[in-house]
Image: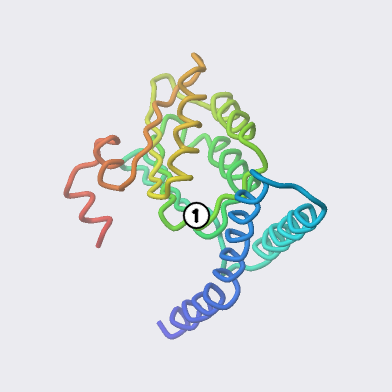
């Protein structure tokens, strides 16, 4: 128990001193660039854009080597035939594709439903909207099982919610897709979509 408390304390320290300020800085600069680039341009904006790119790259490199930050963690519930993934902090391009490649290549979860909870995600570092289409195409190619399954995305944040619907649209347009995608604001809605009973929800909350 003492060892667990020490690990939790280090994790909280890392989250508060390094992770959250890093993520907040990246998010603030992104918002500034979005507002300014709509009405003006210039070399100073290019320099700020490069600065933000460097910040994002440094954060990504840091997350690779720090066990305290795991942008996507997932667990498998074989009894419910369900993969539950939870994101946190900064969601990078490589995080999402890495998760898809990892889970999609596991034969023991073929035909399982999926739940992606993005409630704790603070920022999505996406190079372009086109990557969502590529992610959907990759997901379709890795679909397995003989019957359709469900894919629930929980995204309370407006940006994550919108991106989730774009992913859903790309998935639904591909006739090869074996997953029915639903995008929701809350876990309760996602549980209903997945058909998870109330008793099991209470068990998860506990």
Is residue 195 rendered to the left or right of residue 88?
Answer: left
Residue at the farthest front position: 39
- Going 28% across and 35% down the picture, which residue do you hit? 193
Q: In which quarter of the image is residue 106?
A: top right
What percent of the width, then of the height, locates residue 118? Answer: 44, 50
Residue at the farthest bottom position: 2
The mark total stands at: 1
Q: Tell me: residue 70, above or below residue 169.
A: below
Q: Tell me: residue 118, above or below residue 142.
A: below
Q: Quadrant of residue 142?
A: top right
Q: How is the image coloured?
A: rainbow
What percent of the width, then of the height, locates residue 15? Answer: 53, 72
Residue at the farthest left position: 199
What percent of the width, then of the height, locates residue 75? Answer: 44, 51
User: Can you identify the residue that label 1 sits on?
Assistant: 73
Quarter occupied by the N terminus? bottom left
Is residue 51 rendered to the left or right of residue 170?
Answer: right
Residue at the farthest top position: 175
Q: Tell me: residue 184, above or below residue 171.
A: below
How many neighbours does mark 1 have within 10 angstroms: few (below 14), some (14-19), or many (20 or more)?
few
What percent of the width, then of the height, locates residue 117? Answer: 41, 49
Residue in front for this viewpoint, 51 or 85: 51
Is residue 153 rendered to the left or right of residue 187?
Answer: right
- Going 60% across and 38% down the picture, which residue do you hit? 101
- Going 31% across and 42% down the picture, which residue do you hit? 79
Q: Is mark 1 on a helix, strand or loop?
A: strand
Quarter occupied by the C terminus? bottom left
């Amino acid at each position: 128990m003492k060892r667990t408390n020490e690990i939790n304390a280090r994790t909280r320290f890392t989250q508060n001193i390094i992770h959250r300020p890093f993520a907040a800085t990246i998010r603030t600069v992104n918002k500034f660039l979005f507002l300014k680039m709509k009405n003006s341009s210039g070399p100073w904006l290019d320099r700020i854009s490069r600065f933000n790119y460097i910040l994002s790259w440094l954060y990504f490199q840091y997350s690779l080597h720090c066990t305290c930050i795991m942008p996507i963690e997932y667990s498998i519930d074989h009894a419910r035939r369900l993969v539950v993934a939870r994101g946190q902090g900064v969601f990078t391009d490589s995080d999402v594709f890495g998760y898809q490649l990892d889970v999609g290549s596991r034969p023991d979860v073929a035909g399982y439903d999926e739940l992606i909870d993005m409630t704790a995600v603070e920022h999505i570092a996406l190079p372009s909207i086109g990557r969502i289409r590529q992610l959907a195409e990759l997901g379709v190619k890795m679909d397995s099982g003989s019957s359709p399954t469900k894919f629930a995305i929980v995204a309370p944040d407006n940006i994550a919610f919108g991106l989730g619907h774009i992913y859903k649209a790309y998935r639904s347009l591909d006739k090869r897709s074996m997953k029915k995608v639903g995008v929701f604001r809350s876990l309760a809605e996602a549980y209903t979509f997945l058909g998870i009973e109330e008793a099991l929800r209470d068990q998860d909350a506990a």
